């Protein structure tokens, strides 16, 4: 079964911490052991796992991606968001997280982020699927 | 069980839509729910999920990757394809796709692409493995 | 169940081949078919699958990533390792590997690498989880 997290973005490019929402879905599932797949259905967004302690890290990641793949680059695609598609392919649209003892297992500093590359937008959807491991 | 999709590329760098082939394997498996892992065994290729509607998006992704990682960069590796190895690591060699009600589940604009970074080549292999979810 | 591989890095940035360690864990598990998830809990590291034959390829990947995301870039985060966080998001912290006939299945030239982006460090941890496929 797939469950959904709705995300609203406020800037053209930003990362939004969805760790608490993913954790809540995993705990509610009562699955003790397995993996949790977090996937976005959008082609101008991504999912990443990175430091959640110092907000400067997220700012640095977004600022650097904007410098690496400039929105102003002369792309062919008419919608003016080709940089967002490139960023989505570089970051990826999905992450796999371990489930241990009924909870997600991340490193001390790790958090799960929805990456908005073509915002601001309402109702961005992140799909979460829990796959039991032991049987 | 693993099944294979064969891909022939016509350019040095291009993306090739393999969504229909992946979908056909999932439907044939009769697995109603789970995930489908798409993986390439090549080190100068990748798998990505991105927009399938406007071909300009794929052109923009490939052109930008070629600008970001130039084939002409002074690499050490003698085969002249180090840019392809770097692109493979940036894009990734595998993607996980949800299976719901016996079919793959993608966003409205999403398609699955084999990324050729060192073509043209015949018989590039993409492996597909279906992992049932519910039991 | 999750098992761990410990990695010690000797440089600030390097890739370390962990294929033999992952293979040993899969063989020991006696799981014949499934997938093996390799995940690092660090936010300044990554996991990639790329060529293991010619060491120049790994050197080229690391050198190019250091040129693409320079440590000297004017980042906000005070620890001086924002480049490592960006590299981690670009490469990714996890890879999924097929298990067939009780062994990992990789391409002829593929090897699994822990990517150190903020070393040298002792006791970097890589988590390996085996998810049986057939049931």
Image (tube, coloured by chain):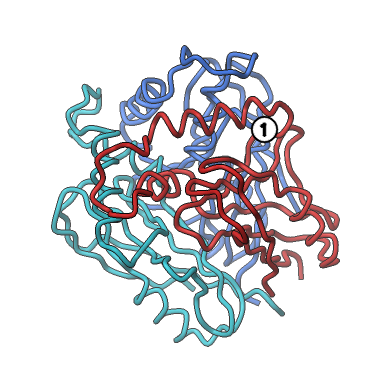
Chain colours: A cyan, B blue, C red
- The image quadrant where one finds the N terminus of chain B is bottom right
Element class at badge 1: strand
In the image, residue B82 above or below residue B104: above
In the image, residue A13 above or below residue A108: above
Instruction: Name the residue at 53% across, 34% down.
Output: C62
Q: On the rendered structure, is B121 left or right of A40?
A: right
Total marks in image: 1
Relative depth, front residue between C82 and C126: C82
Q: On the rendered structure, is C32 left or right of B69?
A: right
Instruction: Name the residue at 69% across, 75% down.
Output: C1
Give the letter of the chain under mark 1.
Answer: C
Dot 1, crowdedness within 10 Å: few (<14), some or many (≥20)? many
Q: On the rendered structure, is C28 left or right of B33?
A: right
Q: In the figure, residue B46 lies in which quadrant?
A: top right
Instruction: Name the residue at 27% across, 53% down.
Output: C77
Q: On the rendered structure, is A6 left or right of B112?
A: left
Relative depth, front residue between B93 and B100: B93
Q: In the figure, residue A120 lies in which quadrant?
A: bottom left
In the image, residue C13 above or below residue B129: above
Residue A85 on image: x %, y %: 31, 39
Q: Mark 1 = which residue?
A: C51
- The image quadrant where one finds the C terminus of chain B is bottom right
Residue C99 on image: x %, y %: 76, 55
Q: In the figure, residue B85 lies in which quadrant?
A: top right
Relative depth, front residue between B37 and C93: C93
Residue B68 on image: x %, y %: 38, 25
Instruction: Name the residue at 22% across, 25% down.
Output: A73
Residue A90 on image: x %, y %: 40, 40
Relative depth, front residue between A130 and C74: C74
In the image, residue A64 above or below residue A34: above
């Amino acid at each position: 079964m797939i469950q959904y997290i709705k995300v609203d973005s406020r800037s053209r490019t930003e990362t939004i911490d969805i760790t608490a929402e993913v954790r809540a879905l995993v705990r509610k599932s009562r699955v003790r052991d397995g993996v949790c797949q977090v996937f976005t259905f959008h082609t101008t967004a991504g999912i990443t796992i990175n430091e959640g302690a110092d907000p400067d890290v997220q700012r640095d990641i977004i600022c650097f991606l904007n410098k690496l793949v400039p929105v102003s680059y002369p792309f062919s695609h008419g919608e003016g968001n080709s940089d967002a598609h490139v960023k989505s392919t570089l970051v990826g649209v999905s992450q796999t997280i371990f489930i241990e003892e009924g909870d997600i297992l991340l490193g001390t500093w790790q958090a799960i982020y929805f990456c908005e590359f073509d915002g601001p937008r309402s109702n961005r959807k992140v799909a979460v699927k829990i796959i039991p491991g032991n049987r």
